[in-house]
Image: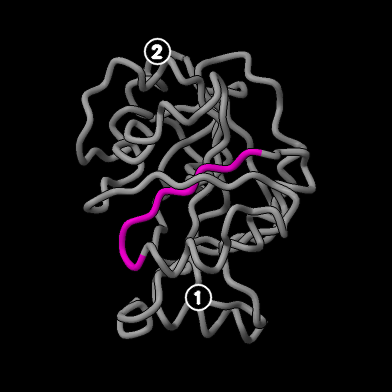
Amino acid sequence: MRPLTDHCPKPLLAVNGKPLIVYHIEALARAGIESIVINVSWLADQIIETLGDGRSFGVDIRYSHESEALETAGGIIHALDQLDEEFVVVNGDTFTDYDFSRLPQLTHQAHLVLVDNPQHNPKGDFAITDGLLSNHGSGRLTFSGIAQYKKSIFSRLVEGKQALAPLLRALADKGHVTAEHFYGEWSDVGTPERLEQLQAN
C-alpha cells in the first residue's frame, strides 16, 4: 500500500471519509460484541490515538502491541491472554458489509467465512464440503479474514511470527472447521488501486 501507508497504518485508510477499521468496530458493536482487542505494530500510536478506549463506539478496546508484525497466527498467540475462550477475528485491512450477528455458535474448533475469488486470488484458498472447510474439491473460495476460533487451538503454540494458513489447513484435514460462503460486499484493500476502486463504488 505504499506510499499511502508510509505515514498512515493500513487500518486507518479511509473509505468515504471513515477509516477501514471503524467500519469493523461499528459492525462488531451492532452484533453485540463489546470487547475488542486490536493488534498494533506499524504506526501503532496513530491507531490508539484515533480509536482510544472504544467508549465512543460503545465498546471496550484493548491493544496488543507487537514489536514487529507477527502475522495472523502469531498475533493471535501474542494476544491470547486478552481473548475469551471463543473469539472472532477480522482483518483490519478489509472492507465488508458482513453482519457479525450471523456467525453461528461454534460446534467445531473454528468457523471461517469464505467469499468469491477476487482477481488477485483467482484459485481461491479452500472449498466447502458438507459445511466443513476443505483443502480439496472444486469450487474453491477465498478466505475473507473473518473467522471464529476456540482459544485452545492456539494455546499450545509458541510465540513468534507465524502464518495462519498452515494451521487452518491442518485443522481442515481433521474436519475441525466449519465454513460458510458469504455473497455480500467484501474487498481486500491491499493496493492503492483497490482502495481507489472501492472509493469509486
* 140 in relation to 176, above or below: below
Picture coordinates of residue 174, whole percent (x, y): 40, 13
Query: Is residue 16 in the magenta section?
Result: no
- Name the residue type under label 2: Lys
In the rendered image, which quarter contains the C terminus? bottom right
Q: Which mark is residue 79?
A: none
Packing grade of label 2 (10 A; few <14, some 14-19, many >=20) is few
Q: Main secondary structure of the magenta part?
A: strand
Instruction: Say which residue appears at 55% left-offset and 64% top-offset.
Output: 187
Instruction: Say which residue appears at 28% left-offset and 32% top-offset.
Output: 166
Picture coordinates of residue 76, whole percent (x, y): 38, 35
The magenta region covers 35-43
* 9 in relation to 137, above or below: below
Q: Which residue is mark 2?
A: 174
Q: Number of callouts in the render? A: 2
From the viewer's perspective, is 195 left or right of 123?
A: right
Picture coordinates of residue 119, whole percent (x, y): 45, 67
- SS assignment at label 2: loop
- SS assignment at label 1: loop
Packing grade of label 1 (10 A; few <14, some 14-19, many >=20) is some
Residue 142 seen in render: no
* 112 in relation to 67, above or below: above
From the viewer's perspective, is 86 left or right of 56?
A: left
Q: Which residue is mark 1?
A: 13
- Name the residue type under label 1: Leu
From the viewer's perspective, is 173 left or right of 148?
A: left
Instruction: Say which residue appears at 50% left-offset and 17% top-offset.
Output: 109
Image quadrant assignment for residue 50:
bottom right
